[in-house]
Image (spheres, coloured by chain):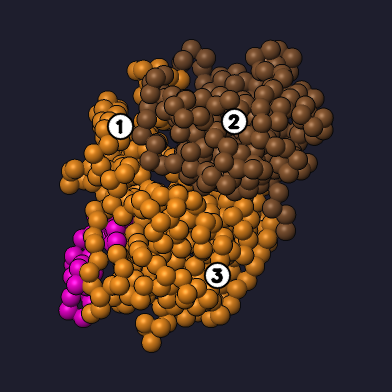
Chain colours: A brown, B orange
Amino acid sequence: MSHRLHPLPWRPVRPGTGIGQLRKPNITFTDTLKNMKQIIEGKAYVLGNDIDTDQIIPAEHLVYSLSDPEEKKNYGKFALSGVPADGAGLPDGNNAFINEGSFDSEFTIIVGGKNFGCGSSREHAPACLKIAGIQAVVAESYARIFYRNSVDGGFFIPFETPDKLGEETRTGDKLIIDVEKENLINETTGKSYSLSSLGEVIEIIRAGNIFEYARQSGLIPSSEA
Amino acid sequence: MGMTITEKILAAHAGKDKVQPSENIWVDVDVLMTHDVCGPGTIGIFKEQFGKNAKVFDREKVVIIPDHYIFTEDKHANRNIDILREFVSEQDLPYYYDVGTENYKGVCHLALAQEGHNRPGEVLFGTDSHTCTSGAFGMFSTGIGNTDAAFILGTGKLWVKVPESMRFEFTGEFPDYIMAKDIILQVIGDIGVDGATYRTMEWTGEAIMDFSMEERMTLCNMAIEGGGKNAIIEADDVTFEYVKKRTDKPYTVYKSDPDANYYFKKTYDASTMEPVVAKPHSPDNKALVKECSDVKINRSYIGSCTGGKYTDFLAAAKLLNGKKVAVDTFIVPATTEVLKDLERETLEGKTLMEVFKDAGCEIGDASCAACLGGPKDTFGRTHGTEVVVSTTNRNFPGRMGSKQSEVYLASPYTAAASALTGHITDPREILN
């Protein structure tokens, strides 16, 4: 049997079917891409398989407010603090994601293995990575709640790759992701990798989050915000 | 082609006659549950998106159950309870089980069941990954994040991708030393921690239907540890009897069609099942209990939504009665109703509580406690290199507090047997 996680397709409900009067967002790809970063580049932080939410943000830290801008910084401070030292920043390990006393990371892109983000439904997990400065995660596959939270909450783009990116990337390598071309280049090694299509979930990513998507689709009146 | 029970429930809540796996649909939500860890974030997003004077979509359909960080001095954790109280008061929500009051319940997944919020055929979302527990009642239930929960608070709807279903059938009868926890650990060991990702785990067969509601909840509870979106067991007389005592709200019963399509089917002979553990640090790191007898432990922990129900403690008490534990043993009833059961129900003339106290166990207040570590002063939390045998659901690094501690997931029988000997012990050694 295949354990492969299929990219999440997104198909808006046609008018007259199901609930509401949803229609495809009245926006074009190029329009919305203006709001979406096209090129994501920066240093890679490499992690292994089955990185769970307790490693991403240990439960004892789930007490801080996500609404208060100052208090929220604590989530950056403790991001990935549950990862055991030998798995922190592969292949060597013992690479701090956040330096002592800091609230954000020098790394921009996380490279993960399979089943990234398994475990709890805590949205603090994708949130803490974003607060730490992460702009994209590229993994072999994701646990579904983490994937869904990343997209619906608009934290970052959870890319998947069929290639052996994790095995061939060292923590600290400079990576460049081209969102439109769906590819990733490791500038340090010169190797190029393909990213799996985001499928129809791109609609929510383009809109920004589930609320913006729903507004553009007419499910929520835009005056409610 | 027929439909599975999960497909039927989702179709009915999307106003459709039929749905198919991978289809994205908007469903009407019957119950939204949140707790103290994710409630404040959910409320924050709800206000930000729908306005500070916004009202929830239906006050009768929102259930708030503080249970995670309840008995702590941590000021941020206590502030989170204040945020819940203020929201409940402002929205006039009838289903709030406040800590420090007679109304306090404890762990949300069992409290939902005991307070009549689990009803066959309904759709329930919760801001906790173990929300899949409610599937034991023949309903669709799954965990979501704060953003999705805030969306439901404002609209009463959420989009879902219809999952493919995997069917696990157990024929015959389980031996009397086997508990539901052994079965879910066996299956997760077989399929892996992402073996059911995006899919339904549907449980069936006469051995499954012989289980109590508590045991069925244990089975469904850990579907998330296999990556599952939801777990489900068709409702039967056992379900109806349990629900009838707790709610008189009407509900609809759905069953899978004989010609429904499954992604995967596997049939097990229940009589051949053995007690199993999940070794550190993954729920799919399966081993037979009898193969681990050389593992010395220094703690046994019996509690949580997975292993802190009445039937879990009854099993543990059968082994501990009249004996003394060899290691620190923590007993944490999931809810206040379970606590009352421990104080009322008897075994050979002693209440279960007396059995545990006489055996030398430490008893905690009803809550999630150390299942997920939590603030430093949490009851039963690990702080060093403890080796724990635990009836909880996860043994990821640091899950119970310390990154250096090692957690073996096991049934209440195995946790109790091991507490008596100080090493991982097959319950048959004590039961016989």
User: In this rendering, is residue A189 above or below B175?
Assistant: above
Dots 1, 2 in contact, CB < 8 A: no
Residue A18 position in % (x across, y down): 59, 34
Of tags 2 and 3, the one toward the viewer is: 3
Callout 2 crowding tier (Cα within 10 Å): few <14, some 14–19, many ≥20:
many
The residues tagged by marks 3 and 1 sit, at their Cα atoms, a distance apart of 40 Å
Residue that mark 1 sits on: B76
Circle 1 chain: B
Q: Are marks 3 and 1 on the same chain?
A: yes
Kindly indicate the quadrant of the structure image that contains residue A27: top right
Residue that mark 2 sits on: A151
Which of the two residues, B152 or A126, is positioned nearer the viewer here?
A126
Compared across the picture, whether B245 is left or right of B306 comes to: left
Residue B42 position in % (x across, y down): 41, 30
Q: Quadrant of the N terminus of chain A?
A: bottom right
Callout 3 crowding tier (Cα within 10 Å): few <14, some 14–19, many ≥20:
some
Residue A9 position in % (x across, y down): 69, 36
Q: Amino acid at mark 2?
A: Val
